[in-house]
């Protein structure tokens, strides 16, 4: 009789899983292809108090679709200002690409629960399984698609740690666009392999600030050894888009249309939590500009607006860049040079220079307008996490669940552990959901520094 070793491995895997968890418990939840959402959720239609309008940087008048579309694709500009349509159809061409990796798994973190000794149930949405290793592809694909159907030939953007830059470079190649990425200089140096990923997909990658734009030259003239920030990189990318024929700017966070595209995360998680027979009491996302926090939170938050639920929503930001916990709510530019529209947001100031923490995707001075309004009105909370605490949580999670998280995601894990312990101390238990927005397999230099005791 022939022995099929692959069948033996499958049987062994199933038996190990059944031995590890009680038979009535399941660890991972996936949706069938037919159950993957075909629309994004537009929270602007439901938010009780609409965000104040973005203002044109020259006229100080509310921006229009025509004004925004000089920089972004027309369709993204329409989505940015759409405050009436609750559901926005996902284009067929984008759905086709989503199906390569969606649905992403919802995972019950049994081992993490055991490691911290909590009575709460902890779940995470694993966005690290996307082709480029993070949630950023959810918006890169539609943005590149909209540009391509409008006849655009080139796209430009900024990136911090490189997850968004990698996603945009990949999406641009899929839709036959040329891409140029300005990567924050400190991350360009800290994370060379993310730079390599972008270059594999054909992107031109420049450390920012650079001497290739007027904005970059001005910044370096004022501060010759400037290590860069997302604000500086945005300025350079926006300038390039304005000066290049057939080029549009794309953005990985902050803007309303970006969080719109990311709501596929929370919409899937809603269905998967139902499969698990639970509903989250707490939803957590790490926070830089708002893309993954909004993506996991907004679909659940709509039920708070109607009074059906009373879920807590927590944004976990780095203590080195605490715009939500220590910033001011006011109009400010989204970039250092002042090229972007003025946004009503919690901000540390558009010329804020954050510390050189390894969570490069969270080193941004401001917050998106929707999240800022939600925080202002008390629909969500914010906590700041020190870098050492975040890496301690990331290492604990890796040992328990076998996934090395991105430094950005470590902040959400740390917040989830804090919350679980908070409820344990109060003698109660809750269901906690957080977004694992990306893996840290290209961030091992940061983990090396942490393990060696050399991290600040």
Image (cartoon, rainbow, N blue to C red):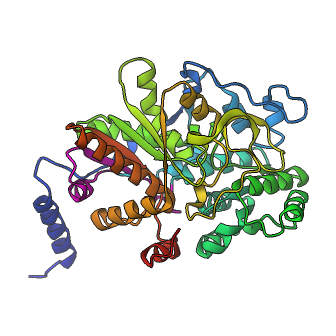
Q: Is residue 284 left or right of residue 376?
A: left
Q: Is residue 190 left or right of residue 296?
A: right
Rendered location of residue 206, percent (x, y): 76, 68
Rendered location of residue 312, percent (x, y): 39, 33
Q: Is residue 140 left or right of residue 231?
A: left
Q: Residue at x 79, y 48 (%)?
A: 151
Residue 82, picture quadrant? top right
Q: Residue at x 60, y 63 (%)?
A: 161
Rendered location of residue 229, percent (x, y): 71, 58
Q: Is residue 169 visible?
A: yes
The quadrant of the picture occupied by the N terminus is bottom left
Rendered location of residue 36, percent (x, y): 42, 41
Residue 66, picture quadrant? top right
Q: Is residue 240 left or right of residue 353?
A: right
- Residue 129 drawn in magenta: yes
**Foreground residue among 427 and 214:** 427
Tell me the magenta residue range: 107-134
In this rendering, the answer to whether 346 lies above or below 310 is below
**Foreground residue among 415 and 187:** 415
Q: Is residue 100 visible?
A: no
- Residue 76 drawn in magenta: no
Residue 255, picture quadrant? top right
**Foreground residue among 381 and 42:** 381
């Amino acid at each position: 009789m022939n022995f099929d070793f692959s069948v033996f491995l499958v049987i062994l895997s199933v038996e190990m899983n059944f031995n590890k968890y009680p038979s009535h418990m399941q660890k991972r939840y996936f949706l069938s292809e037919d159950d993957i959402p075909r629309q994004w959720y537009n929270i602007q239609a439901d938010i009780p108090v609409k965000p104040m309008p973005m203002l044109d940087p020259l006229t100080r008048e509310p921006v229009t679709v025509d004004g925004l579309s000089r920089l972004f694709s027309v369709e993204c500009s329409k989505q940015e200002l759409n405050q009436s349509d609750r559901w926005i159809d996902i284009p067929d061409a984008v759905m086709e690409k989503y199906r390569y990796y969606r649905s992403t798994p919802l995972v019950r973190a049994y081992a993490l629960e055991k490691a911290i000794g909590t009575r709460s149930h902890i779940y995470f949405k694993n966005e690290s399984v996307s082709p480029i290793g993070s949630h950023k592809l959810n918006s890169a694909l539609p943005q590149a698609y909209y540009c391509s159907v409008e006849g655009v030939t080139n796209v430009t953007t900024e990136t911090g740690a490189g997850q968004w830059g990698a996603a945009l470079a990949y999406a641009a190649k899929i839709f036959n666009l040329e891409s140029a990425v300005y990567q924050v200089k400190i991350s360009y140096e800290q994370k060379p392999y993310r730079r390599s990923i972008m270059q594999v997909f054909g992107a031109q990658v420049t450390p920012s600030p650079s001497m290739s734009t007027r904005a970059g030259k001005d910044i370096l003239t004022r501060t010759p050894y400037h290590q860069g920030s997302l604000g500086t990189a945005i300025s350079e990318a926006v300038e390039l888009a304005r000066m290049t024929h057939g080029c549009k700017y794309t953005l990985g966070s902050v803007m309303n249309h970006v969080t719109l595209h990311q709501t596929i995360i929370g919409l899937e998680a809603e269905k998967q939590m139902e499969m698990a027979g639970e509903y989250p009491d707490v939803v957590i996302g790490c926070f830089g500009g708002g893309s993954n926090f909004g993506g996991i939170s907004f679909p659940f938050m709509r039920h708070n607006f109607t009074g059906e639920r009373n879920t807590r929503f927590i944004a976990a930001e780095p203590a080195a860049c605490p715009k939500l916990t220590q910033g001011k709510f006011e109009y400010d530019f989204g970039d250092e040079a002042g090229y972007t529209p003025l946004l009503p947001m919690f901000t540390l100031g558009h010329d804020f220079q954050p510390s050189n923490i390894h969570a490069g995707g969270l080193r941004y001075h401001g917050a998106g307008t929707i999240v800022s309004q939600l925080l202002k009105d008390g629909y969500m909370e914010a906590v700041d996490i020190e870098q050492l605490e975040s890496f301690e949580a990331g290492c604990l999670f890796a040992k328990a669940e076998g996934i090395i998280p991105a430094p950005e995601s470590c902040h959400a894990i740390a917040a989830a552990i804090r919350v679980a312990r908070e409820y344990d101390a109060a003698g109660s238990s809750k269901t906690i959901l957080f977004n694992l927005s990306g893996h840290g397999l290209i961030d091992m230099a940061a983990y090396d520094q942490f393990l060696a005791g050399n991290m600040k």
